Amino acid sequence: MSGASRGEFSSSFGFIMAAAGSAIGLGNIWGFPTQTAQNGGAAFVILYLIMAFLVGYPILLAEFTIGRHSQSNPVGAYKSIKGGSRFVPVGFLGLFTVGLILSFYSIIAGTMVAYFISPFLSLVGANDAAAWVISQGVGANMLFASLFFFLTILIVAAGVKNGIEKWSSRLMPTLLLILVLLVIYVLTLDGAMEGLKVYLLPDFSKVLSAGLFTSALGQAFFSLSLGVGSMLVLASYTSKKENLVRLGRLVTLSDVGIAFLAGLLIIPAMYAASASGTQIFDEAGNLISGPNLIFQVLPALFNSMGSIGVALSIVFFFLMIIAALTSTISMLEVPVAYAVDNRNVARSKASIAIGVFFWAVSMTIALNFDLLFNLVVTMTTQYIQPLLGLFICIFVGWVMSRNTLIEELKQGNPEIENSFFMKIWPLFVRYVSPILILIILIQAF
Ligand code: TRP
Protein backbone atom coordinates (compact mmCIF):
# COMPACT_ATOMS: atom_id res chain seq x y z
CA MET A 1 0.00 0.00 0.00
CA SER A 2 1.39 3.39 -0.96
CA GLY A 3 2.45 6.04 1.54
CA ALA A 4 -0.35 8.48 0.91
CA SER A 5 -3.19 6.04 1.39
CA ARG A 6 -1.88 4.59 4.63
CA GLY A 7 -1.92 8.01 6.32
CA GLU A 8 0.71 10.40 7.61
CA PHE A 9 1.06 12.87 10.49
CA SER A 10 0.62 16.45 9.35
CA SER A 11 3.34 17.87 11.64
CA SER A 12 6.12 16.90 14.04
CA PHE A 13 3.93 18.22 16.85
CA GLY A 14 1.23 15.73 15.90
CA PHE A 15 3.70 12.87 15.87
CA ILE A 16 5.28 13.87 19.19
CA MET A 17 1.85 14.10 20.81
CA ALA A 18 0.87 10.68 19.43
CA ALA A 19 4.12 8.99 20.48
CA ALA A 20 4.20 10.75 23.85
CA GLY A 21 0.51 9.89 24.17
CA SER A 22 1.35 6.24 23.62
CA ALA A 23 4.17 6.32 26.13
CA ILE A 24 2.37 8.38 28.77
CA GLY A 25 -0.36 6.28 30.27
CA LEU A 26 -1.43 4.39 33.34
CA GLY A 27 2.15 3.15 33.45
CA ASN A 28 3.31 6.67 34.30
CA ILE A 29 0.57 8.02 36.49
CA TRP A 30 -0.23 4.82 38.29
CA GLY A 31 2.58 2.32 37.72
CA PHE A 32 5.55 4.59 38.29
CA PRO A 33 4.44 6.18 41.59
CA THR A 34 3.28 2.77 42.80
CA GLN A 35 6.62 1.17 42.05
CA THR A 36 8.41 4.11 43.60
CA ALA A 37 6.34 3.76 46.77
CA GLN A 38 7.09 0.03 46.84
CA ASN A 39 10.79 0.35 46.18
CA GLY A 40 12.04 2.93 48.60
CA GLY A 41 11.31 6.27 46.92
CA ALA A 42 14.07 8.29 45.31
CA ALA A 43 16.42 5.33 44.89
CA PHE A 44 13.97 3.83 42.43
CA VAL A 45 13.49 7.16 40.67
CA ILE A 46 17.21 7.45 39.91
CA LEU A 47 17.47 3.88 38.69
CA TYR A 48 14.43 4.38 36.50
CA LEU A 49 15.92 7.46 34.87
CA ILE A 50 19.10 5.53 34.08
CA MET A 51 17.18 2.60 32.59
CA ALA A 52 14.91 4.81 30.51
CA PHE A 53 17.83 6.59 28.88
CA LEU A 54 20.35 3.78 28.64
CA VAL A 55 18.06 0.96 27.54
CA GLY A 56 14.71 2.49 26.63
CA TYR A 57 15.86 5.31 24.40
CA PRO A 58 18.16 3.20 22.18
CA ILE A 59 15.40 0.65 21.59
CA LEU A 60 12.84 3.37 20.98
CA LEU A 61 15.10 4.76 18.31
CA ALA A 62 15.58 1.29 16.84
CA GLU A 63 11.78 1.00 16.52
CA PHE A 64 11.52 4.48 15.03
CA THR A 65 14.18 3.63 12.45
CA ILE A 66 12.59 0.32 11.39
CA GLY A 67 9.17 1.95 11.25
CA ARG A 68 10.04 4.94 9.14
CA HIS A 69 12.39 3.00 6.91
CA SER A 70 9.81 0.34 6.05
CA GLN A 71 6.74 2.65 6.16
CA SER A 72 4.96 -0.36 7.56
CA ASN A 73 3.79 -2.33 10.60
CA PRO A 74 5.99 -4.89 12.45
CA VAL A 75 5.08 -7.79 10.15
CA GLY A 76 5.33 -5.73 6.97
CA ALA A 77 8.62 -4.23 8.16
CA TYR A 78 10.32 -7.57 8.74
CA LYS A 79 8.98 -8.79 5.39
CA SER A 80 10.33 -5.84 3.47
CA ILE A 81 13.76 -5.29 5.04
CA LYS A 82 16.64 -7.44 3.82
CA GLY A 83 17.36 -10.31 6.22
CA GLY A 84 14.06 -9.82 8.02
CA SER A 85 12.04 -12.74 6.71
CA ARG A 86 13.06 -14.99 9.61
CA PHE A 87 11.75 -12.32 11.99
CA VAL A 88 8.20 -12.30 10.59
CA PRO A 89 6.88 -14.56 13.39
CA VAL A 90 8.31 -12.03 15.86
CA GLY A 91 6.19 -9.38 14.13
CA PHE A 92 3.06 -11.51 14.48
CA LEU A 93 3.83 -12.17 18.14
CA GLY A 94 3.98 -8.39 18.58
CA LEU A 95 0.57 -7.87 16.96
CA PHE A 96 -1.03 -10.46 19.18
CA THR A 97 0.76 -9.36 22.36
CA VAL A 98 -0.21 -5.72 21.97
CA GLY A 99 -3.82 -6.89 21.58
CA LEU A 100 -3.58 -8.81 24.85
CA ILE A 101 -2.10 -5.74 26.53
CA LEU A 102 -5.03 -3.72 25.18
CA SER A 103 -7.41 -6.33 26.62
CA PHE A 104 -6.22 -6.06 30.21
CA TYR A 105 -5.34 -2.37 30.06
CA SER A 106 -8.91 -1.48 29.07
CA ILE A 107 -10.22 -3.11 32.23
CA ILE A 108 -8.08 -0.85 34.44
CA ALA A 109 -8.82 2.14 32.21
CA GLY A 110 -12.51 1.31 32.56
CA THR A 111 -12.21 1.49 36.35
CA MET A 112 -10.88 5.03 35.94
CA VAL A 113 -14.03 5.88 33.98
CA ALA A 114 -16.11 4.35 36.78
CA TYR A 115 -14.41 6.51 39.42
CA PHE A 116 -14.90 9.53 37.19
CA ILE A 117 -18.63 8.89 36.80
CA SER A 118 -19.41 7.82 40.35
CA PRO A 119 -19.49 11.35 41.92
CA PHE A 120 -21.99 12.47 39.27
CA LEU A 121 -24.27 9.57 40.18
CA SER A 122 -24.03 10.51 43.87
CA LEU A 123 -24.84 14.09 42.98
CA VAL A 124 -28.17 13.10 41.43
CA GLY A 125 -28.94 10.86 44.40
CA ALA A 126 -28.27 7.54 42.65
CA ASN A 127 -26.17 6.28 45.54
CA ASP A 128 -26.57 2.57 44.85
CA ALA A 129 -25.47 3.07 41.26
CA ALA A 130 -22.55 5.25 42.44
CA ALA A 131 -21.36 2.44 44.68
CA TRP A 132 -21.96 -0.26 42.06
CA VAL A 133 -19.88 1.39 39.35
CA ILE A 134 -16.77 1.51 41.56
CA SER A 135 -17.34 -1.97 43.01
CA GLN A 136 -14.88 -3.43 40.47
CA GLY A 137 -17.25 -6.35 40.18
CA VAL A 138 -17.46 -8.43 37.01
CA GLY A 139 -20.43 -6.49 35.64
CA ALA A 140 -18.89 -3.07 36.22
CA ASN A 141 -15.57 -4.19 34.76
CA MET A 142 -17.26 -5.50 31.63
CA LEU A 143 -19.37 -2.41 31.15
CA PHE A 144 -16.55 0.12 31.50
CA ALA A 145 -13.94 -1.88 29.61
CA SER A 146 -16.47 -2.10 26.76
CA LEU A 147 -16.90 1.65 26.84
CA PHE A 148 -13.15 2.06 26.58
CA PHE A 149 -12.96 -0.29 23.62
CA PHE A 150 -15.73 1.67 21.94
CA LEU A 151 -13.84 4.98 22.28
CA THR A 152 -10.56 3.43 21.13
CA ILE A 153 -12.15 1.86 18.04
CA LEU A 154 -13.85 5.15 17.11
CA ILE A 155 -10.58 7.09 17.18
CA VAL A 156 -8.48 4.47 15.38
CA ALA A 157 -11.16 4.05 12.71
CA ALA A 158 -11.01 7.80 12.03
CA GLY A 159 -7.42 7.40 10.80
CA VAL A 160 -3.95 8.73 11.49
CA LYS A 161 -4.58 12.44 10.95
CA ASN A 162 -8.23 12.77 11.92
CA GLY A 163 -8.17 10.23 14.72
CA ILE A 164 -4.84 9.60 16.39
CA GLU A 165 -3.15 12.92 15.67
CA LYS A 166 -6.19 15.08 16.32
CA TRP A 167 -7.07 13.46 19.62
CA SER A 168 -3.52 13.12 20.93
CA SER A 169 -2.84 16.79 20.15
CA ARG A 170 -5.92 17.83 22.09
CA LEU A 171 -5.62 15.46 24.99
CA MET A 172 -1.91 15.54 25.82
CA PRO A 173 -1.64 19.30 26.54
CA THR A 174 -4.80 18.99 28.66
CA LEU A 175 -3.16 16.18 30.57
CA LEU A 176 -0.06 18.24 31.32
CA LEU A 177 -2.13 21.19 32.50
CA ILE A 178 -4.30 19.09 34.82
CA LEU A 179 -1.30 17.28 36.23
CA VAL A 180 0.61 20.47 37.01
CA LEU A 181 -2.43 22.06 38.68
CA LEU A 182 -3.02 18.95 40.79
CA VAL A 183 0.64 18.83 41.86
CA ILE A 184 0.58 22.48 42.92
CA TYR A 185 -2.58 21.94 44.92
CA VAL A 186 -1.46 18.76 46.63
CA LEU A 187 1.87 20.26 47.68
CA THR A 188 -0.01 22.87 49.72
CA LEU A 189 -1.71 20.18 51.84
CA ASP A 190 -0.61 19.28 55.38
CA GLY A 191 1.79 16.37 55.39
CA ALA A 192 2.69 16.68 51.71
CA MET A 193 6.25 17.83 52.44
CA GLU A 194 7.03 14.61 54.24
CA GLY A 195 5.99 12.69 51.14
CA LEU A 196 8.12 14.95 48.99
CA LYS A 197 11.17 14.03 51.10
CA VAL A 198 10.52 10.32 50.72
CA TYR A 199 10.16 10.82 47.00
CA LEU A 200 13.24 12.96 46.45
CA LEU A 201 15.83 11.84 49.02
CA PRO A 202 17.30 8.50 47.97
CA ASP A 203 17.84 5.61 50.35
CA PHE A 204 20.99 4.26 48.71
CA SER A 205 20.87 1.00 50.61
CA LYS A 206 18.02 0.06 48.27
CA VAL A 207 19.61 1.04 44.96
CA LEU A 208 21.81 -1.98 44.88
CA SER A 209 19.19 -4.69 45.13
CA ALA A 210 18.75 -6.82 42.01
CA GLY A 211 14.96 -6.79 42.23
CA LEU A 212 14.96 -3.01 42.05
CA PHE A 213 17.07 -3.08 38.94
CA THR A 214 14.73 -5.42 37.09
CA SER A 215 11.62 -3.54 38.24
CA ALA A 216 13.09 -0.29 36.94
CA LEU A 217 13.94 -1.82 33.59
CA GLY A 218 10.54 -3.50 33.26
CA GLN A 219 8.85 -0.22 34.10
CA ALA A 220 10.91 1.62 31.45
CA PHE A 221 9.91 -0.97 28.85
CA PHE A 222 6.23 -0.77 29.59
CA SER A 223 6.22 2.98 29.95
CA LEU A 224 7.94 3.60 26.62
CA SER A 225 5.54 1.13 24.90
CA LEU A 226 8.51 -0.87 23.58
CA GLY A 227 8.77 -4.20 21.79
CA VAL A 228 5.29 -4.79 20.45
CA GLY A 229 5.41 -2.25 17.64
CA SER A 230 3.39 0.73 18.91
CA MET A 231 6.34 3.05 18.39
CA LEU A 232 7.37 1.37 15.16
CA VAL A 233 3.94 1.91 13.62
CA LEU A 234 3.65 5.52 14.78
CA ALA A 235 7.07 6.31 13.29
CA SER A 236 5.98 4.73 10.00
CA TYR A 237 3.56 7.66 9.62
CA THR A 238 6.21 10.38 10.01
CA SER A 239 7.72 12.22 7.09
CA LYS A 240 11.31 11.72 5.95
CA LYS A 241 11.97 15.33 6.89
CA GLU A 242 11.81 14.61 10.60
CA ASN A 243 14.88 14.16 12.77
CA LEU A 244 14.16 10.83 14.46
CA VAL A 245 16.99 11.13 16.99
CA ARG A 246 15.58 14.40 18.25
CA LEU A 247 11.99 13.12 18.25
CA GLY A 248 13.02 10.03 20.20
CA ARG A 249 14.77 12.19 22.76
CA LEU A 250 11.69 14.39 23.14
CA VAL A 251 9.40 11.40 23.57
CA THR A 252 11.68 9.80 26.18
CA LEU A 253 11.99 13.09 28.05
CA SER A 254 8.23 13.66 28.08
CA ASP A 255 7.59 10.13 29.25
CA VAL A 256 10.10 10.37 32.06
CA GLY A 257 9.03 13.92 32.88
CA ILE A 258 5.36 13.01 33.25
CA ALA A 259 6.19 9.96 35.36
CA PHE A 260 8.28 12.20 37.59
CA LEU A 261 5.46 14.76 37.87
CA ALA A 262 2.96 12.01 38.66
CA GLY A 263 5.22 10.94 41.50
CA LEU A 264 5.21 14.53 42.77
CA LEU A 265 1.44 14.25 42.88
CA ILE A 266 0.86 10.75 44.23
CA ILE A 267 3.51 10.29 46.92
CA PRO A 268 2.87 13.66 48.65
CA ALA A 269 -0.88 12.98 48.28
CA MET A 270 -0.41 9.73 50.20
CA TYR A 271 1.31 11.51 53.06
CA ALA A 272 -1.38 14.20 53.01
CA ALA A 273 -3.98 11.44 53.21
CA SER A 274 -2.10 10.01 56.16
CA ALA A 275 -2.11 13.41 57.88
CA SER A 276 -5.89 13.47 57.52
CA GLY A 277 -6.31 10.02 59.00
CA THR A 278 -6.12 7.57 56.10
CA GLN A 279 -4.08 4.44 56.53
CA ILE A 280 -1.16 4.52 54.08
CA PHE A 281 1.05 1.75 55.45
CA ASP A 282 0.20 -1.94 55.34
CA GLU A 283 0.71 -4.39 58.23
CA ALA A 284 4.34 -4.90 57.28
CA GLY A 285 4.96 -1.16 57.53
CA ASN A 286 5.38 -0.62 53.80
CA LEU A 287 3.62 2.11 51.87
CA ILE A 288 0.40 0.79 50.35
CA SER A 289 0.90 0.29 46.65
CA GLY A 290 -0.67 -1.60 43.79
CA PRO A 291 -4.30 -0.99 42.86
CA ASN A 292 -5.18 0.00 46.41
CA LEU A 293 -3.07 3.10 46.12
CA ILE A 294 -5.24 4.69 43.48
CA PHE A 295 -8.53 3.09 44.44
CA GLN A 296 -8.31 3.44 48.23
CA VAL A 297 -5.80 5.99 49.41
CA LEU A 298 -6.60 8.75 46.93
CA PRO A 299 -10.40 8.44 47.14
CA ALA A 300 -10.06 8.50 50.94
CA LEU A 301 -8.02 11.69 50.66
CA PHE A 302 -10.58 13.25 48.32
CA ASN A 303 -13.42 12.25 50.66
CA SER A 304 -11.75 13.90 53.62
CA MET A 305 -11.70 17.20 51.73
CA GLY A 306 -15.42 17.79 51.28
CA SER A 307 -16.72 19.36 48.07
CA ILE A 308 -13.31 20.49 46.78
CA GLY A 309 -12.35 16.83 47.13
CA VAL A 310 -15.21 15.78 44.85
CA ALA A 311 -14.03 18.24 42.22
CA LEU A 312 -10.42 17.08 42.56
CA SER A 313 -11.44 13.46 42.26
CA ILE A 314 -13.33 14.14 39.05
CA VAL A 315 -10.38 16.03 37.60
CA PHE A 316 -7.90 13.37 38.68
CA PHE A 317 -9.81 10.49 37.11
CA PHE A 318 -10.37 12.53 33.96
CA LEU A 319 -6.58 12.83 33.77
CA MET A 320 -6.28 9.05 34.07
CA ILE A 321 -8.82 8.55 31.29
CA ILE A 322 -6.91 10.85 28.92
CA ALA A 323 -3.62 9.15 29.71
CA ALA A 324 -5.11 5.72 29.11
CA LEU A 325 -6.99 6.59 25.93
CA THR A 326 -3.97 7.96 24.04
CA SER A 327 -2.20 4.71 24.99
CA THR A 328 -4.96 2.30 23.96
CA ILE A 329 -5.19 4.04 20.58
CA SER A 330 -1.53 3.23 19.91
CA MET A 331 -2.15 -0.40 20.89
CA LEU A 332 -5.10 -1.05 18.60
CA GLU A 333 -3.29 0.79 15.80
CA VAL A 334 -0.61 -1.94 15.53
CA PRO A 335 -2.75 -4.87 14.31
CA VAL A 336 -4.98 -2.44 12.39
CA ALA A 337 -1.94 -1.15 10.49
CA TYR A 338 -1.10 -4.75 9.57
CA ALA A 339 -4.61 -5.38 8.23
CA VAL A 340 -4.53 -2.13 6.24
CA ASP A 341 -0.96 -2.49 4.88
CA ASN A 342 -0.68 -6.20 4.24
CA ARG A 343 -4.25 -7.44 3.90
CA ASN A 344 -5.75 -4.49 2.05
CA VAL A 345 -8.62 -4.17 4.49
CA ALA A 346 -10.29 -0.75 4.81
CA ARG A 347 -9.20 1.03 8.01
CA SER A 348 -12.70 1.35 9.46
CA LYS A 349 -13.47 -2.32 8.90
CA ALA A 350 -10.12 -3.41 10.30
CA SER A 351 -10.55 -1.24 13.41
CA ILE A 352 -13.98 -2.68 14.13
CA ALA A 353 -13.12 -6.33 13.42
CA ILE A 354 -9.84 -6.35 15.37
CA GLY A 355 -11.30 -4.15 18.10
CA VAL A 356 -14.23 -6.51 18.59
CA PHE A 357 -11.93 -9.53 18.63
CA PHE A 358 -9.79 -8.14 21.47
CA TRP A 359 -12.91 -6.81 23.20
CA ALA A 360 -14.06 -10.44 23.38
CA VAL A 361 -10.67 -11.38 24.84
CA SER A 362 -11.04 -8.54 27.34
CA MET A 363 -14.51 -9.76 28.36
CA THR A 364 -13.09 -13.26 28.84
CA ILE A 365 -10.44 -11.81 31.15
CA ALA A 366 -13.08 -9.80 33.05
CA LEU A 367 -15.27 -12.90 33.47
CA ASN A 368 -12.35 -14.95 34.79
CA PHE A 369 -10.58 -12.10 36.51
CA ASP A 370 -8.89 -14.01 39.35
CA LEU A 371 -7.70 -16.70 37.03
CA LEU A 372 -6.58 -14.63 34.03
CA PHE A 373 -5.86 -11.01 34.86
CA ASN A 374 -2.50 -11.31 36.60
CA LEU A 375 -1.51 -14.15 34.33
CA VAL A 376 -2.01 -12.07 31.18
CA VAL A 377 -0.31 -9.02 32.70
CA THR A 378 2.74 -10.99 33.78
CA MET A 379 3.02 -13.01 30.60
CA THR A 380 2.78 -10.04 28.25
CA THR A 381 4.68 -7.35 30.13
CA GLN A 382 7.32 -9.32 32.03
CA TYR A 383 8.16 -12.03 29.51
CA ILE A 384 6.99 -11.32 25.97
CA GLN A 385 7.61 -7.58 25.82
CA PRO A 386 11.31 -7.80 26.84
CA LEU A 387 11.72 -10.82 24.56
CA LEU A 388 10.37 -8.84 21.60
CA GLY A 389 12.67 -5.96 22.58
CA LEU A 390 15.58 -8.37 22.45
CA PHE A 391 14.64 -9.39 18.89
CA ILE A 392 14.46 -5.74 17.85
CA CYS A 393 17.99 -5.22 19.19
CA ILE A 394 19.22 -8.29 17.34
CA PHE A 395 17.56 -7.16 14.14
CA VAL A 396 18.73 -3.57 14.20
CA GLY A 397 22.10 -4.28 15.82
CA TRP A 398 23.15 -7.39 13.92
CA VAL A 399 20.95 -7.93 10.85
CA MET A 400 20.27 -4.52 9.34
CA SER A 401 23.32 -3.00 7.70
CA ARG A 402 24.92 0.03 9.25
CA ASN A 403 24.55 1.75 5.92
CA THR A 404 20.79 1.31 5.81
CA LEU A 405 20.51 2.67 9.34
CA ILE A 406 22.64 5.71 8.56
CA GLU A 407 20.81 6.40 5.31
CA GLU A 408 17.49 6.33 7.16
CA LEU A 409 18.60 8.45 10.11
CA LYS A 410 20.34 10.95 7.84
CA GLN A 411 16.99 12.01 6.41
CA GLY A 412 16.01 14.96 8.55
CA ASN A 413 19.39 14.85 10.28
CA PRO A 414 22.20 15.14 7.70
CA GLU A 415 25.04 15.59 10.20
CA ILE A 416 24.40 12.32 11.98
CA GLU A 417 26.96 10.22 10.15
CA ASN A 418 29.98 11.48 12.06
CA SER A 419 28.21 12.39 15.26
CA PHE A 420 28.95 11.10 18.73
CA PHE A 421 25.48 9.61 18.75
CA MET A 422 26.24 7.36 15.79
CA LYS A 423 29.34 6.03 17.57
CA ILE A 424 27.46 5.16 20.73
CA TRP A 425 23.96 4.11 19.68
CA PRO A 426 24.95 1.01 17.64
CA LEU A 427 27.01 -0.24 20.58
CA PHE A 428 24.01 0.06 22.85
CA VAL A 429 21.69 -1.70 20.44
CA ARG A 430 24.23 -4.46 19.82
CA TYR A 431 25.51 -5.11 23.31
CA VAL A 432 24.29 -3.06 26.25
CA SER A 433 20.51 -3.23 25.73
CA PRO A 434 20.31 -6.92 24.75
CA ILE A 435 22.54 -8.00 27.62
CA LEU A 436 20.46 -6.04 30.12
CA ILE A 437 17.26 -7.49 28.66
CA LEU A 438 18.68 -11.00 28.93
CA ILE A 439 19.42 -10.32 32.57
CA ILE A 440 15.81 -9.28 33.27
CA LEU A 441 14.48 -12.28 31.39
CA ILE A 442 16.68 -14.69 33.31
CA GLN A 443 15.62 -13.02 36.56
CA ALA A 444 11.98 -13.28 35.56
CA PHE A 445 12.28 -17.03 35.06
N1 TRP B 1 3.19 3.04 27.70
C1 TRP B 1 1.83 3.08 28.11
C2 TRP B 1 1.76 3.34 29.61
O1 TRP B 1 2.72 3.73 30.19
C3 TRP B 1 1.08 1.82 27.75
C4 TRP B 1 1.32 1.32 26.37
C5 TRP B 1 0.92 1.85 25.17
C6 TRP B 1 2.00 0.13 26.06
N2 TRP B 1 1.33 1.06 24.14
C7 TRP B 1 1.99 0.00 24.66
C8 TRP B 1 2.62 -0.81 26.87
C9 TRP B 1 2.62 -1.07 24.06
C10 TRP B 1 3.22 -1.87 26.27
C11 TRP B 1 3.25 -2.00 24.89
O2 TRP B 1 0.74 3.20 30.22
Image (cartoon, rainbow, N blue to C red):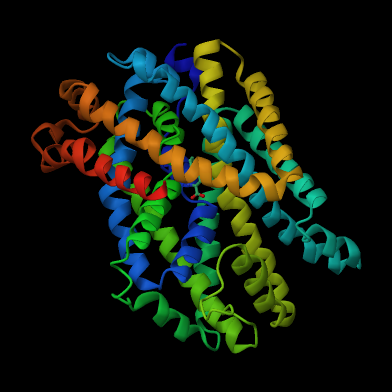
> Is residue 301 visible to us here?
yes
At x 59%, y 68%, the residue is 293
- For the point 35% across and 45% down, the residue is 442
The number of callouts visible is 0
**Occupied quadrant, residue 164:** top right
Give the residue displayed 36% in from the left and 66% down from the top: 45
Residue 64, can we see it? no
Q: Residue at x 14, y 37 (%)?
A: 422
Is residue 75 or residue 383 the one in the foreground? 383
Position in image of residue 263 (x %, y %)? 46, 68
- Answer left or right for 287 relative to 197: right
Q: Where residue 343 sits: x, y (%)?
A: 55, 11
What is the residue that sits farthest to the left in this orientation? Answer: 418
Q: Position of residue 183 (x, y in %)?
A: 50, 72
Q: Indicate the position of residue 70 as horizontal and vertical percent values.
A: 35, 19
Question: What residue occupies the far front of the structure in this picture?
Answer: 445
Please name whichever residue, 185 or 354, is drawn nearer the observer in this view of the structure.
354
Q: Is residue 276 above or below residue 114?
A: below
Residue 166 falls in which quadrant of the image?
A: top right
Position of residue 256 in the picture relative to residue 246 (left or right): right
